[in-house]
Image: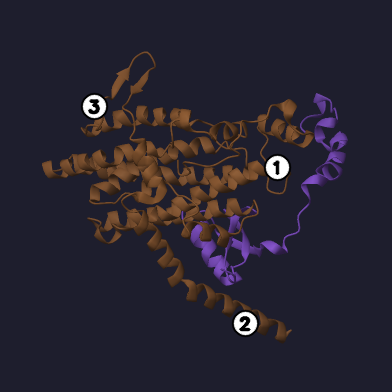
Amino acid sequence: MYAQMVKSTGERPKTLDEMTPEERAFQQRVDADIKIEPKEWMPEGYRKTLVRQISQHAHSEIVGQLPEGNWITRAPTLDRKAILIAKVQDEAGHGLYLYCAAETLGVSRDEMTEQLLSGKAKYSSIFNYPTLTWADIGAIGWLVDGAAIMNQVQLQKCSYGPYSRAMIRICKEESFHQRQGYDIMMKLCAGTAEQKEMAQDALNRWWQPSLMMFGPSDKDSVHSAQSMAWKIKPMSNDELRQKFVDQTVPQAEYLGLKIPDPDLKWNEGKKGYDFGEIDWNEFYEVLRGNGPCNKERLDARRKAWDDGAWFRDGLMAHAQKAKARRLAAE
Amino acid sequence: MKNEWPLWEVFIRGQHGLAHRHFGSLHAPDAEMAIKNARDVYTRRNEGVSIWVVRASDIAASAPGEKEPLFDRSNSKIYRHPTFYDIPEEVGHM
């Protein structure tokens, strides 16, 4: 999702018999839905997997500001502009909640930043696509935030307390994001033929990348079993993707837009939609760094970090001097 | 990368009359900036009327391993709860 290819231990989960007494006590707490808190004992694999997942999630929130920030100066009205600024500011806040949650596991903020800027840590593939028209801002809110919410709602039940609490807060704030996106789409679809065409074009380009947000198909997802056993990830990639398609198709119909998938069909037997195979080749290429905007996004983050260095250092120097003066006065 | 801004814990009073509650944490160079940042990070939707910030390194906490010696003793002291005492109905509300 916002964390798509989180490496876990790479091994199948241990059975209760194979576990050490400590591991068994831990697993039994997880199974009983008792939240795990920062200073408590946890298996090293649990800690590492969580750090990867939460930091990837945080990086996605931060990088996710870039495609939308692209339209702040060009929003069609002052209202839309104020709303978009509020939304982008929320994404920054969500990134910060998540970094804090990861820090409770013993990784520092600077280490995480370093991993993002060096390309070692990943962020969601979705943010490596360009925002070409205003309708893309609508499509992102509707589809990308819609998919994000679907993922984050189940993550509220995550076994790790700080992550679960960050998710609860984020979900509360995020529903405005999806609604404002759909509101943009409704406006465009009720407008001129060109405006409606623009909305359709945005849907055409964002549909597949949105489905990819849920990560590889379950059969190729080698790390899922352990993450699910630890309740780091309550639902599987394919389950979430199916839920998203079922929720979104009627919303597209309401707008009078066509989902760009010739294989999309209602399946009465499973009470859900069948849909076409996703272009997994594209997905892996984007994750590998070869998407349309990977370079631009990382360059923007590096520039922001480098350009902000004097500010971070200056404030720190001021704080230290002020503290020394206070001590001298005592 | 060194010289990382220290971590602060943020406490917010949601409404007048309520206690400050832990909301989360953030990095800031000093207390003044920590309060400003807390305003932006944690109160974008009118969540509070007052903010406290404390350096995370200044908080002393009980160890998770001491949970039993610290808290289990009170389990058996049920006479500390009002429901322990049977008061006849004729006495009325007490």
Mark 2 and mark 1 on one chain:
yes
Q: Residues within 10 Å of mark 3 (few under 14, many from 20)?
A: few
**In the rendered view, does A59 fall on the left or right side of A162?**
left
User: Do the CB atoms of the residues marked 2 and 3 lie less than 8 Å apart?
Assistant: no
Q: Report helix, strand or loop for mark 3.
A: loop
The residue tagged 2 is A321
Q: Which is more toward the observer, A280 or A63?
A: A280
First reached walking from the N terminus: tag 2 or tag 3 = 3
Where residue A60 appears, as percent x and y from the top left, is: 44, 50
Q: Is residue B43 visible?
A: no
Where residue A315 appears, as percent x and y from the top left, is: 54, 76
Give the vertical position of A219 relative to A180 (above or below): above
Where residue A99 appears, as percent x and y from the top left, is: 55, 54
The residue tagged 1 is A42
The letter of the brown chain is A
Q: Nearer the viewer, mark 2 or mark 1?
A: 1
Mark 1 and mark 3 on one chain:
yes
Residue at image position (43%, 72%) is A307
The residue tagged 3 is A262
Picture disc at residue B43? none
Kindly identify the amino acid type of the residue bearing the numbered disc 3.
Pro
Kindly identify the amino acid type of the residue bearing the numbered disc 2.
Lys
Give the vertical position of A12 relative to A198 (above or below): above
In the figure, the shade used to draw chain B is: purple
Give the alpha-carbon distance from disc 1 to disc 3, as whole Å.
47 Å
Q: Report helix, strand or loop for mark 2.
A: helix
First reached walking from the N terminus: tag 2 or tag 1 = 1
Q: Residues within 10 Å of mark 1 (few under 14, many from 20)?
A: some
Q: Nearer the viewer, mark 2 or mark 3?
A: 3
Give the alpha-carbon distance from disc 2 to disc 3, as whole Å.
66 Å
Residue at image position (81%, 35%) is B82
